Image (spheres, helix red, strand yellow):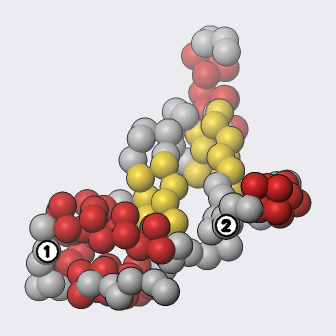
Amino acid sequence: MKAQRTRSQERILALLKTLNRAVSAQDLYVELRSQSQSMGLATVYRSLDALKLEGVVQVRTLASGESLYSCLQQDKHHLTCLQCGASIPIHECPVHELETQLQQSHQFKIYYHTLEFFGLCDPCQAAQSASGVVS
């Protein structure tokens, strides 16, 4: 039996559904304030943690260390450029079979997974080549 959500958790979940994109806790905090639904930043983080543990919110950590939160959707995978920060979605998933195997072999309920590749996008590679920097 899952615990009942707090009003703050419900407001954050509703906002994430409305925004329909991954956002930082800071962005959620600012958005709530702009809608006159003010709550403390610590409450935003606590609510996000509770929703994550419930399996209804997923978090993606960028190369910069920033965490982005979104409603649980299909698993999302990305190519992320370390120089400009561009993030290119990958639509195929090579690990679904592994996920199924892990759930069975470890009796572990997986809510979602992330897969991220870090490197340089084409424009940043071209800029590096033009500047003479070799990687």
Q: Residues within 10 Å of mark 2 (few under 14, many from 20)?
A: few
Point out the frontmost of discs 1 and 2: 2
- Whole-angstrom CA distance, mark 1 to mark 2, is 32 Å
Q: Quadrant of the C terminus?
A: top right
Q: Which residue is mark 1?
A: 39
Task: Kindly state the secondary structure of the residue where label 2 is placed.
Answer: loop
Residue sitting nearer the eye, 30 or 71: 71
Residue at 37% across, 64% down: 49
- Is residue 70 at all visible to an observer of this figure? no
Residue type at tag 2: Lys
Q: Give the x, y percent position of residue 77.
A: 68, 57
Hey, what amino acid is under mark 1?
Met
Q: Quadrant of residue 30?
A: bottom left
* Residue at horizontal 33 percent and vertical 85 percent from the top: 5
What residue lies at 38% left-to-right and 83% top-to-bottom? 3
Q: State whether residue 92 is above or below residue 55.
A: above
Specify which label sits upstream in the sequence, 1 or 2.
Answer: 1
The residue depicted at 20 percent of the width and 78 percent of the height is 32
Residue toward you, 79 or 132: 79
Horizontal arrangement in the rendering, residue 106 relative to residue 97 (left or right): left
Q: Which residue is mark 2?
A: 109
